Amino acid sequence: MVVDELRELELDRLFQAFADSTRRDMLRRVSLDGLSVSGLGQHYDMSFAAVQKHVDVLERASLVTKEKRGREQIVRADRNGLQKAQRLLENYEANW
């Protein structure tokens, strides 16, 4: 039961992260190379705080990691998280 609830929470976070086109684009950008939060924000017409909130959603879904480098936070795609997301989706696909 607890494992199923955890899986449901993971799926909720994953689909919440993928539900927004800006977050999908952010994930694409940091998959190519790590970017600082401020560097990532230069690609969007939104405040730094809004960019940070989007990154936080991606991080809670285990799709990105943040690494402190000096005064900056470097955002990178989390390959393990992406692979886990893929496996979760494949489990659903197997039931279709």
Image (cartoon, rainbow, N blue to C red):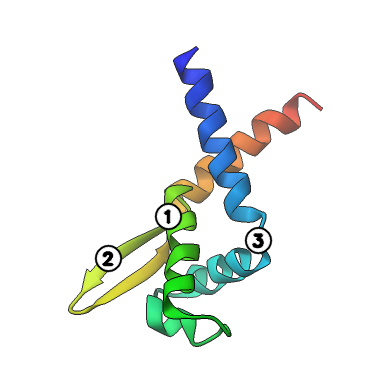
The residue at which mark 2 appears reads as 67
Which residue is at 63% across, 54% downward? 18
Residue drawn at point x = 42 percent, y = 59 percent: 56
Report x, y in % for residue 78. 43, 56
Residue bearing the label numbered 1: 59
The mark nearer the N terminus, 2 or 1, is 1
- Taking the image as drawn, is residue 43 in sight? yes
Q: Nearer the viewer, residue 66 or 50?
A: 50
Circle 2 or circle 1, nearest the eye? 1
- Give the x, y percent position of residue 90: 67, 35
* C-alpha distance separating marks 1 and 3: 14 Å
Amino acid residing under circle 1 = Glu
- Determine the residue located farthest toward the left in the rendered image: 70
Q: Earlier in the sequence, mark 1 or mark 3?
A: 3
Q: Position of residue 79 (x, y in %)?
A: 45, 54
Mark closest to the chain's N terminus, 2 or 3? 3
Quarter in which the C terminus is drawn: top right
Horizontal arrangement in the rendering, residue 42 relative to residue 75 (left or right): right
User: In the figure, is residue 1 to the left or right of 21?
Assistant: left
At label 3, the amino acid type is Asp
Circle 1 SS class: helix
* Amino acid, disc 2: Glu
Relative to 76, is 3 above or below? above
Kindly identify which numbered label has been placed on residue 20. Answer: 3
